[in-house]
Amino acid sequence: MKLDMFTIGQVFQTKSFKLTKEDIVRFAGEFDPQYMHLDVEKANKGRFNGIIASGIHTLAISFKLWVEEGFYGDDVIAGTRMNNIKFIKPVYPEDELHIIVEVIDKKATKNETGILTVLLSTFNGKEEKVLEGELSVLIKR
Protein backbone atom coordinates (compact mmCIF):
# COMPACT_ATOMS: atom_id res chain seq x y z
CA MET A 1 0.00 0.00 0.00
CA LYS A 2 1.19 3.50 -0.73
CA LEU A 3 1.29 6.20 1.96
CA ASP A 4 -1.96 7.78 0.78
CA MET A 5 -3.82 4.48 1.25
CA PHE A 6 -3.13 4.41 4.99
CA THR A 7 -5.25 6.47 7.40
CA ILE A 8 -4.36 7.66 10.87
CA GLY A 9 -6.12 5.45 13.41
CA GLN A 10 -6.27 2.49 11.04
CA VAL A 11 -5.66 -0.79 12.91
CA PHE A 12 -4.35 -4.14 11.71
CA GLN A 13 -3.83 -7.46 13.49
CA THR A 14 -1.19 -9.99 12.48
CA LYS A 15 -1.19 -13.75 12.57
CA SER A 16 0.42 -15.47 15.57
CA PHE A 17 3.89 -16.88 16.12
CA LYS A 18 4.66 -19.50 18.76
CA LEU A 19 8.11 -19.12 20.30
CA THR A 20 9.95 -22.27 21.39
CA LYS A 21 12.74 -22.68 23.92
CA GLU A 22 14.99 -23.71 21.04
CA ASP A 23 14.16 -20.48 19.17
CA ILE A 24 15.02 -18.43 22.26
CA VAL A 25 18.33 -20.20 22.91
CA ARG A 26 19.37 -20.11 19.23
CA PHE A 27 18.70 -16.38 18.88
CA ALA A 28 20.30 -15.52 22.23
CA GLY A 29 23.35 -17.64 21.52
CA GLU A 30 24.06 -15.53 18.47
CA PHE A 31 22.74 -12.08 19.36
CA ASP A 32 22.09 -11.72 23.13
CA PRO A 33 24.13 -14.28 25.09
CA GLN A 34 22.91 -13.47 28.58
CA TYR A 35 22.12 -16.12 31.20
CA MET A 36 18.35 -15.41 31.34
CA HIS A 37 18.11 -16.48 27.69
CA LEU A 38 20.58 -19.39 27.74
CA ASP A 39 21.16 -20.97 31.16
CA VAL A 40 18.05 -22.85 32.33
CA GLU A 41 19.38 -23.58 35.82
CA LYS A 42 20.48 -20.01 36.51
CA ALA A 43 17.35 -18.55 34.85
CA ASN A 44 15.12 -20.75 37.05
CA LYS A 45 16.68 -19.07 40.10
CA GLY A 46 16.33 -15.57 38.67
CA ARG A 47 13.51 -13.05 38.83
CA PHE A 48 11.67 -14.50 35.81
CA ASN A 49 11.61 -18.13 37.07
CA GLY A 50 12.87 -19.51 33.77
CA ILE A 51 14.32 -18.81 30.36
CA ILE A 52 12.89 -15.74 28.63
CA ALA A 53 13.26 -14.39 25.12
CA SER A 54 15.58 -11.49 24.44
CA GLY A 55 13.71 -8.21 24.01
CA ILE A 56 15.52 -7.79 20.69
CA HIS A 57 14.20 -11.20 19.64
CA THR A 58 10.66 -10.17 20.57
CA LEU A 59 11.10 -6.95 18.57
CA ALA A 60 12.40 -8.89 15.55
CA ILE A 61 9.42 -11.29 15.66
CA SER A 62 7.04 -8.32 15.95
CA PHE A 63 8.60 -6.68 12.91
CA LYS A 64 8.53 -9.97 10.98
CA LEU A 65 4.83 -10.54 11.70
CA TRP A 66 3.93 -7.01 10.60
CA VAL A 67 5.99 -7.14 7.40
CA GLU A 68 4.61 -10.58 6.49
CA GLU A 69 1.08 -9.13 6.45
CA GLY A 70 2.16 -7.55 3.15
CA PHE A 71 0.70 -4.07 3.52
CA TYR A 72 3.99 -2.35 2.67
CA GLY A 73 4.70 -4.63 -0.27
CA ASP A 74 7.07 -3.13 -2.82
CA ASP A 75 6.03 0.41 -1.85
CA VAL A 76 8.29 0.51 1.21
CA ILE A 77 11.72 2.01 0.53
CA ALA A 78 13.47 1.74 3.90
CA GLY A 79 13.00 1.90 7.63
CA THR A 80 13.87 5.31 9.04
CA ARG A 81 13.61 4.94 12.82
CA MET A 82 12.25 3.14 15.84
CA ASN A 83 11.17 5.13 18.87
CA ASN A 84 9.85 4.49 22.35
CA ILE A 85 10.58 0.77 22.36
CA LYS A 86 9.28 -0.71 25.63
CA PHE A 87 9.85 -4.26 26.83
CA ILE A 88 6.82 -4.55 29.11
CA LYS A 89 6.61 -8.21 30.16
CA PRO A 90 8.89 -11.19 29.66
CA VAL A 91 8.23 -13.60 26.81
CA TYR A 92 8.54 -17.29 27.73
CA PRO A 93 8.95 -20.48 25.69
CA GLU A 94 5.64 -21.55 24.14
CA ASP A 95 4.23 -18.01 24.28
CA GLU A 96 2.18 -17.28 21.18
CA LEU A 97 2.69 -13.69 20.04
CA HIS A 98 0.53 -11.51 17.81
CA ILE A 99 0.72 -7.82 16.97
CA ILE A 100 -1.82 -5.02 16.84
CA VAL A 101 -0.57 -2.30 14.51
CA GLU A 102 -2.03 1.20 14.55
CA VAL A 103 -1.19 3.94 12.05
CA ILE A 104 -0.26 6.94 14.21
CA ASP A 105 1.31 9.40 11.76
CA LYS A 106 1.95 10.00 8.07
CA LYS A 107 3.73 12.85 6.35
CA ALA A 108 4.40 13.51 2.69
CA THR A 109 8.03 14.24 1.82
CA LYS A 110 9.87 15.01 -1.42
CA ASN A 111 9.97 12.93 -4.57
CA GLU A 112 6.61 11.15 -4.24
CA THR A 113 7.48 9.60 -0.90
CA GLY A 114 6.40 9.97 2.69
CA ILE A 115 7.03 8.79 6.23
CA LEU A 116 4.53 6.37 7.73
CA THR A 117 4.67 5.71 11.48
CA VAL A 118 2.90 2.81 13.13
CA LEU A 119 2.62 1.73 16.74
CA LEU A 120 3.42 -1.96 17.18
CA SER A 121 1.83 -3.55 20.26
CA THR A 122 2.83 -7.16 20.83
CA PHE A 123 0.64 -9.45 22.93
CA ASN A 124 1.09 -12.96 24.29
CA GLY A 125 -1.60 -15.65 24.26
CA LYS A 126 -3.06 -14.28 27.52
CA GLU A 127 -3.60 -10.92 25.77
CA GLU A 128 -0.92 -9.30 27.96
CA LYS A 129 1.06 -6.60 26.21
CA VAL A 130 4.73 -7.64 26.16
CA LEU A 131 6.23 -5.02 23.83
CA GLU A 132 5.35 -1.65 22.37
CA GLY A 133 7.21 0.59 19.95
CA GLU A 134 6.90 3.05 17.10
CA LEU A 135 8.24 2.15 13.67
CA SER A 136 8.65 4.67 10.85
CA VAL A 137 9.31 3.84 7.21
CA LEU A 138 9.97 5.77 4.03
CA ILE A 139 7.26 4.70 1.61
CA LYS A 140 5.98 5.65 -1.85
CA ARG A 141 3.00 7.99 -2.05
Image (cartoon, rainbow, N blue to C red):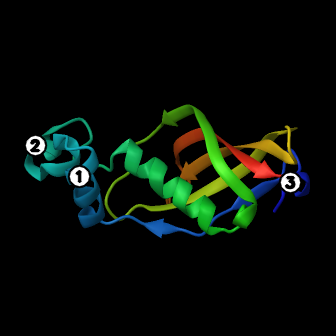
- Looking at this rendering, what residue extends furthest in the front direction? 111
Q: Write the residue at 72% across / 61% down.
A: 72
Distance (Cα) linking label 1 and label 2: 19 Å
The numbered mark at residue 6 is 3
Q: Secondary structure at mark 1?
A: helix
- Across and down, in percent, residue 96 comes to 46, 64
Residue at 69% over, 45% down:
137
> In the image, what residue type sits under mark 1?
Glu
Give how far across and how far down residue 105 sits, in percent.
81, 38
* Residue under pointer 1: 30
Residue at numbered disc 2 = 42
Give coordinates of residue 46: x percent, y percent: 18, 37
Crowding at dot 1, Cα within 10 Å, few <14 / some 14-19 / many 20+, comes out as few
Which amino acid type corresponds to the residue marked 3 in the rendered image? Phe
Q: Are marks 2 and 3 in contact (CB under 8 Å)?
A: no
Q: What is the three-letter code of the residue carrying label 2? A: Lys
Left or right side of 24 for 104: right
Position of the N terminus, as image quadrant, is bottom right
